Image (spheres, rainbow, N blue to C red):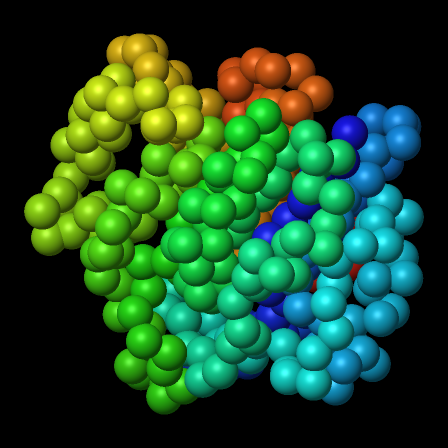
Amino acid sequence: MKIGIIGQPCIDEIIAPDGSLRASALGGILYSYAALEAAMRTRGSRDSFLALSWNSAPDQHLLSPLFERFQRLGDAGLWSTVSLSNRVKLVYATDADRSEHCASILPSITASELERIALDELDGVFVNMISGFDISLDTFEWLSARMTSTYIHLDVHALVLGELSAKIGIGRVTRGVESWDRWIRNADTVQLNELEARTLASPSITDEAALIQTIRRLASGSSNVRTKGIIITRAERGATYYDVTSNHEFSIPVPETNIIDTTGSGDVFGSAFLFQFLVTKDAVKAMRFAIEYASRNAEMATLEEWLR
């Protein structure tokens, strides 16, 4: 199996609810890499993944020691850039509620970069919108049209966040996404948390049930919609899978978890879901696996613990 991952590395500063600096650490898409590396090692086969992102030359002293520990990372991707990796301040009000502050980000990945990859060799692609600008809608549609037989999983993530913001106290503001339906229709499964589900199609749709109903109509009304499932993650309350080709839905609870830091758990969930779905072709098994991995991540202090 070979999986491509689109999304950008970050240097995160974790600000605790009391205002103290909890940690400064590697983050962003690197959580997805680390969890996928662990899953592939556990399977014991010759699985591999491609990091389809920019690789900051000025940050090599931080990134290279981590990349050297990935046994399943392929040679393609990781295009060099002189730009710094994304710098993100994650300010937590509670363990489940945070604001995001980011002054600058890496540029979007374009079709010209992706065309350098042997895309036909990929069984799945995880598009994780770490900054919200990791890939443009036009490029995402190009990718979907180019990879009709490859499974695409989209994590909406920061797509619903507005302009960049560096000032503490004024985080990036959530807002509805223009042409949100075009993002949805070009992924096989779409992952959102509850806030993202309320925000994605706002102001016209601000209710999760109404959003799912609308997507079901979208999926049943056109042969050009590849969407099969919508996943709503609910932090300590688990996650729900909506089969939008039918009225079937199910929820998976979270196992008992000793929470240390929830940062990156959504990124872990997405890569774990895609991996297990490609292995089993079973959404229930993939959801249980993703919940297990996201819970394990919350019990870790750093993403490097995945590589022990």
Above or below, comparing residue 122 to residue 96 in the picture: above
Left or right of residue 214: residue 83: right
Left or right of residue 125: residue 226: left
Q: How many marks?
A: 0
Q: Position of residue 305 (x, y in %)?
A: 78, 54
Q: Position of residue 67 (x, y in %)?
A: 83, 62
Q: Position of residue 183 (x, y in %)?
A: 36, 45
Q: Which residue is more in the foreground, 12 or 126?
A: 126
| Residue occupying the point 45% across, 31% down | 189
| Residue occupying the point 36% across, 88% down | 167
Q: Which residue is more in the foreground, 128 or 22?
A: 128
Q: Quadrant of the N terminus?
A: top right
Q: Quadrant of residue 28?
A: bottom right
Above or below, comparing residue 66 to residue 116 in the picture: below
Any part of residue 73 in sight: yes
Left or right of residue 229: residue 304: right
Left or right of residue 16: residue 264: right
Above or below, comparing residue 111 to residue 268 in the picture: below
Any part of residue 32 in sight: no
Above or below, comparing residue 203 to residue 197 in the picture: below
Q: Quadrant of residue 227?
A: top left
Q: Which residue is more in the foreground, 55 or 63?
A: 55
Q: Position of residue 206 (x, y in %)?
A: 14, 45
| Residue occupying the point 22% across, 20% down | 221
